[in-house]
Amino acid sequence: MSVATARKAPAKKAAQPTKAEIKAKLEASQKAKILERLASGDSLRQICSLKGMPAISTAMKWAATDAEFAEQYARAREAQADLMFEQLDDVSEDATKAKSAVQVNGLRLKADNIKWKLARMSPKKYGDKVQVGGAADLPPIETSLKVTFVVPKR
């Protein structure tokens, strides 16, 4: 075996990731953090105000243009609503332990705020409105009218 064939070829440097690959990896990481924190109860405003997170407008753009992220975002919002619903029990428990009417009123305001948000976040599940028909998932309301003409007697 000759010296030339015994030498190994120098190792090639690993290819540097492109800017597009770096951006895609960063976006994926940010999207995952947004979904995780939404599901754990944080608001999108709180999440996007953190260092290293995108602007709210960017997160909303992702939800509007990325079908996969939009689906995951909707599921995270559902989990967030369910968590908020669970918090109502904690608020009412705190109200029973309140030492003054001011504390009770503050907790009532908090509970009302949570209920208001829930009704808007998930109206079918937590809303007050009862739909009787005409919605996409309900049959249309059927009405009928019967008119009978009567000739007066003379």
Image (cartoon, rainbow, N blue to C red):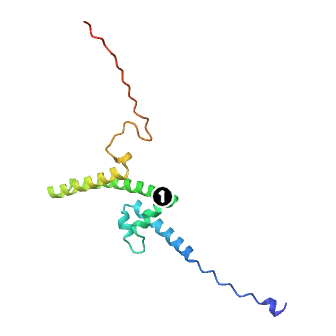
Q: Residues within 10 Å of mark 1 (few under 14, many from 20)?
A: some
User: Residue 98, image x and y in percent?
Assistant: 19, 57
The quadrant of the rendering that contains the N terminus is bottom right
User: Residue 50, image x and y in percent?
Assistant: 38, 72
Q: SS of the residue at dot 1? A: helix
Residue at (49% x, 61% y) in the render: 65
Looking at this rendering, what residue extends furthest in the right direction? 1
Looking at this rendering, what residue extends furthest in the front direction? 154
Whether residue 100 is visible? no
On screen, residue 81 above or below 57: above
Counting the numbered discs, the total is 1
Residue at (65% x, 84% y) in the render: 13
Looking at this rendering, what residue extends furthest in the top direction? 154
On screen, residue 24 above or below 153: below
Q: From the viewer's perspective, is 3 left or right of 152?
A: right
Whether residue 116 is visible? yes
User: Residue 35, image x and y in percent?
Assistant: 44, 62
Q: From the viewer's perspective, is 34 left or right of 14?
A: left
- Which amino acid, by three-letter code, is at mark 1? Ala
Residue corresponding to mark 1: 70
The quadrant of the rendering that contains the C terminus is top left
Residue at (45% x, 58% y) in the render: 73
User: Residue 24, image x and y in percent?
Assistant: 53, 71
Q: From the viewer's perspective, is 66 left or right of 150?
A: right
Residue 147, quarter of picture: top left
On screen, residue 83 above or below 15: above
Residue at (38% x, 64% y) in the render: 44
Which is nearer the eye, 147 or 84? 147
